[in-house]
Image (cartoon, grey):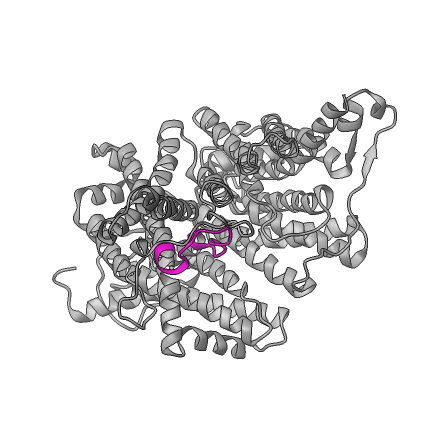
Amino acid sequence: MEGTSVRQKIGVILEALYYPIMALLASFLIGSIVILLTSSTSPLAAYSFMLKGAFGSMAAWQDTIIKAIPFVFTALSFSVARRCGIINLGAEGQFIMGALLATVVAVQLPLAVALPKFIHLPITLIAGFLGGALYGLLVAVLKVQFGASELITTIMLNYIARYLVSFAVNGPLKEPGQSTYPQSARFPETASLGSIVPGVRLHWGLVILLICVVLYYLYQWKTSKGFEARIVGFNPSAGEYAGINIKAATLRSLFIAGGLAGLGGCIEMVSIQMRLHMTSFSVSYGFTGIAVALLGSLNPVGVVVAGVLFGGLSAGSLSMEVMTDVKSSVALIIQAFVILFIAGRRMFTIRRKRHFRYHPVAQDEMGLPLPAPDEKDATHREQMPRLVTDKTDEDEVEGGN
Amino acid sequence: MDGISSFLASTLSLATPTLLAALGILVSERSGVLNIGTEGMMLVGALGGVLGSYYTGSVWLGTLIGIVVTVAFAAVFGVFAVLVKADQTVVGTGMNILASGLTITVNRAVFGASMSPPIIDTFDKVAIPLLKDIPILGPSLFTQTIPGYLAFVMVIATSFFLFRTNTGLKVRSVGENPQACDTVGINVSKVRFLAVLYSGILAGLAGAFISMGQLSFFTEGMIAGGGFMAVAAVVFGNYTPLGVLGASLVFGLSNASSYRLQALSTGIPSEFPNMLPYIITIIALCVTSRRSKKPASSAQPYIKA
């Protein structure tokens, strides 16, 4: 983007925001129809309660951000895999496995050796990362070794992960002396992440998350491995032709993707839930992450912003349910339509010329200029595996007229 | 003997929804649309069926309502995946979340938060005269519900449709080479959209069968991966109706074994038998994915040149 004027940059940013904003508007519009049909509350009233519950006070903001943290982790997980052309529907299971392995280390390890916090906490976090990463790696191995589609294996592994948790909290990890509730012992102080500032609910997980966001950016755009992964995602045969080891890229991407989801699960444990139980994963962290990633265009900043929006949707819908007769599951419907409208964002393309004039150079996923756009070329690009952020919309091509 | 027969009966009953849904997925796959939204469609069919049966008092009208609602739901998938030409896997994922949100919202709005399910009309078992007296096979194979029989008839019907009719040829051609079809005047989008609606009919019936044939109530998330298993059954069955039948029977068997293992007091924690169908599905995919003949333009949106 060097050499472009401020005006052009603003144009590019507006361009990038257009589809997410349209998708959000359309989704909330449909949400309001559902509210009209299934409750006696007016959609406007319901949404105002939602807004208040999400961003209406300092406490609401904190709640929103705390809820956003796991969503951004799973969104990063989806993004890393998607950049390499893999649809990771398994962030759910990887999140759970991260939480499970972290619980083992947090609760069982102190029984064997007494550890100071500066050792115990890091290895708990590493265990969380590894739990998810290995689970993600399993998907990659099944894919490269046997050709098993990740679309199905990830879903199967999500269910298996839930049963593993159920087994663990009913069996080996069950709190000693506890007979009624199937749950693990409480995490010791040495394996807990506290508040950033005393008296505030925001915890250090936020800082770890932001570091991961920066690392995601650095890996994907500043390292050769990340670059390779994006080429594989953009055009596998071109990648192969360029001598990229597609199998290695797949394995690496799913390892990192799983690890990010696992770390998210671990952080949710060590900072919020503090013990593993059957209902630890009643929120669908993995699938919300998909919506967050798509709304954020797999972009580091975009994913954080989208994550806060969905954290707000989650926090706000709960307070909406308390204040009105609208069900919080309306949030799930809105989330689903965000995914649908982002995937089908072509439907929002306006063919007429935009007001702001800039001369965009059509770019592909790697930021390289594309050949002169003509009708035939546009078609060709459409047929290649498309990334969410690739710019294939006709109006952009016409923008220079 | 009774044990074997009831095990066989439970295998068939558990294979039925997979088979029905997978036959629908097969047709849409053959037309080039990968329908991973089947899970959601079955969920919608399951609730639609229960609601229909609850209000009309008839399992048949309930099933019809379940199917109609599911076809409407499938139309949304079709609009995004076929007409707007969005990424089919992402749209499918969106549809599954949508189904989960819709069914939770509607279920709670209609039945409230009460835990006791409403009493509804369900599918009865219909024994076929004479055949029902065959030992072992009689009480299982020839004493099923109507959708149970229908699923097996549909195998032959789908086979005939895909490989012996003009329309079936069109469906298969569109899935293999949409460009060529377009040139000879076949409306690719129309064929694919109709194929998606067709898969909606069968997914709706499959869902209604789960909530009114296997069980007699609706619970949130009750499909529990069954739609994805149906997608896997199509790959496992090498994209042919007979193959899909075999795959569905294997999955039905693994489900039935899972229940049987839980019923027997083996000392194994119930979670492991519960995992069995999911593990079998993964293994089945690993064994067959490389050999399976996927339609050439599967999951590729067709954009007119």
- Look at 26% across and 45% down and name the residue there: A230
- Is residue B246 in view from this perspective? yes
Tell me the chief SS of the magenta region.
loop
- Is residue A74 in view from this perspective? no
Q: Position of residue A305 (x, y in %)?
A: 32, 65
Q: Where is residue A48 in the image (x, y as percent from the top left)?
A: 48, 78
Q: What stretch is highlighted in magenta?
A: A269-286
Where does the N terminus of chain B fall, quadrant-wise?
A: top right
- Look at 34% across and 38% down and name the residue there: A134
Left or right relative to A353: residue B263: right
Q: In this view, does A119 lie above or below B294?
A: below
Q: Where is residue B50 in the image (x, y as percent from the top left)?
A: 71, 53
- Look at 53% across and 56% down and name the residue there: B98
Instruction: State the residue in front, A142 or A302.
Output: A142
- Residue A100: quarter of image: top left
Instruction: State the residue in front, A266 or B134.
Output: A266
Instruction: State the residue in front, A12 or A274.
Output: A274
Magenta stretch: residue A283 in it? Answer: yes
Q: In this view, does A43 lie above or below B226?
A: below
Magenta stretch: residue A388 in it? Answer: no
